[in-house]
Amino acid sequence: MLWKAYLIDLRIMKKPKPHHLYNSLILICICLLLSSFSYYQTAADPKPSDYGRTWQNLPIIPELSDTAKRILADGLRRGNNPNAFSKVGDCDTSTDWYLSNYDLDERYYNLGEYADQFRPVIDFFRGSFGRRSLAAKPGFSAASVLSNYWTDYSICETGEVPITCEYRINNPAFVLISLGTNDGYNPPSFKDNLRAIIDLTIEQGRLPILMTKADNVEKDFSINQDIADLAAEYDIPLWNFWAAIQEIPNHGLVEDGIHLTFYKEDFSDPESFQYAWTYRNLTAMQLLDKVRKIIKDISIN
Amino acid sequence: MKQLRIVILFCLVILICSACNASSKESGAAKVVESFYHAIVNQERDQVGTIACAAWEKTALREIDAFMGVKAELSNVTCSVKETNGDTASVICTGKIAASYGNEITDFPLDGRIHTVVKEQGEWRLCGY
C-alpha cells in the first residue's frame, strides 16, 4: 500500500497542475527578491563583526577617543564624581585582589618602578579601589547586573537593578566592566545584555570601559569578539586584558581555565610577572592613569 | 415541590461547577508563575514562550540568564492567586531561590513580589512583577 501511495505522489510531482507551477514561480521570485534585499542590507550597513575582527592585536591600554572624552565631559557637567569609578563584573571583579589594596597603605602593595606614576592615581581615585561594588558578585552574568533579583534591597531602592543602584550610590565618572565568563554557556544573549549595560551607562554620562576576559569557556572566543565589537561600535575604550597575559604560563589561568593565577601584589618582584593578577592590576592602574589625566584636562577646560 | 427540588439541585450543580472553573482558572495563573521559577533554576530558556506574555518575553529571558552563572534550586516555592480581575491576576509566592557559587550561597526570597499574570490567547502568561 505504501509503495502505491508513493507512486501516486511521484505522478503528481511529474505532472504539476498549471496553477501550482505559477504559485511555485511566484514563491521563487519572492525568495530571490528577499535574498537580494538582505544581501543589499548586509553590503550597505557596516557589520559590527567587522570592527573587532582583529581584537587579539588591539593594544592592551586603549587611547580614549573623542567620543569617550565627550561622554566623560558630559557626565562631569551633569555632576558625576570625577574621582570615582565603579567596577562591574563577576568573581574576578568582586574579589579583594582587584585593585582593593590601593585603598590600604603601602604595606599591602609594592609599586616598584611604577611608584611615581601610580601614587597620583591612588590619591585621585581614593575610595573607589576598595569599594564593594553593588554590581559585582561571584556568578554574575551580564544579565545579572540588570536583574532586580540580584539587587541588594538593604541598600538599594525599589525598582533598582544592581547597576543602577551602584551608579546612584557611587556616582562614578567611568566604569570598568569585566563580564562574560559566566555567559560562556549562552553567548547569543551576552551581546544584547552587554549592549543594554553600555546604553544605560552612557545615558547617565558615565564612560563604560570594556575589558576582554582571560578565559575562553565558550571555546571560540566569541564573547571577546562581542566585547571588542561593541567597544568599536560605541567608540568606547577596550582594555584588552586578554592580550596582556598571553605570554605568561598557562595564559595566566589556573587549572579550571577560568580563574586568574595569583601572586602577592609586588611590582618590584620579577617573579610576580609570571602571574595574571599582577597584569590585571598593573594594566588597570595604567588605564586609570590615562583616564585621570583626561579627567583633569576636562576639569581645567 | 418536586420541581422546586430539581431547580435547587440544578442551581447547586451550576454553582459548584462555576466555582471549580474559577479555581482552575486561578491555579493556571499561579502555575505559570511557578513554571517561571522552575525555568530559572533549570535554565529552560526554551520554555519562555509558554510562560511569559509577548511584551515581557525579553525580560523573562534576561531573568533566566541572570542565574546562568550559579547553581540554583527552589526551596518550598508555592504560588497562589491574590486577586483576579477579568483576564488579569495578581500572584504571590512563598519560598525562595537558593543560588550557590562555590561555597557562597545567596537566597532570593520570593515573598513580597506581586506577579502580574494576564490571559493571552486563552492562556495565562506572566507579564512582570
Image (cartoon, coloured by chain):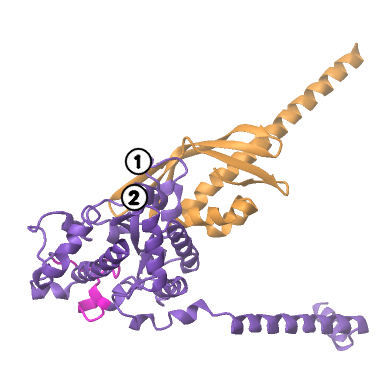
Instruction: Note whether A216 is above or below B102 in the view shown.
Output: below
Q: Which residue is mark 1?
A: A155
| Three-letter amino acid code of the residue under disc 1 | Ile
Q: Nearer the viewer, residue A124 or A250?
A: A124
Looking at the rendered image, the quarter that the C terminus of chain A falls into is bottom left
Q: Colour of chain A?
A: purple
Label 1 sits on a secondary structure element that is: loop
Rendered image: mark on residue B27: none
What kind of element bears circle 2? loop
Residue position marked by numbered label 2 in the rendering: A134
Q: CA separation, marks 2 and 1?
A: 9 Å
| Percent position of residue A54, x then y | 39, 83
Residue A140 visible somewhere in the drawing = no
The quarter of the picture where residue A125 lies is bottom left
Q: Are marks 2 and 1 on the same chain?
A: yes
Q: Quadrant of residue A185?
A: bottom left
The residue that appears at 18% across and 60% down in the rendered structure is: A122
Q: Determine whether, in the image, residue A177 is placed left or right of residue B127.
A: left
Q: Colour of chain B?
A: orange
Q: Is label 2 in contact with label 1 (beta carbons under 8 Å)?
A: yes
Predominant secondary structure, magenta span:
loop
Magenta-highlighted residues: A244-263
Q: Which residue is pictured at 64% across the width and 41% down the height?
A: B28
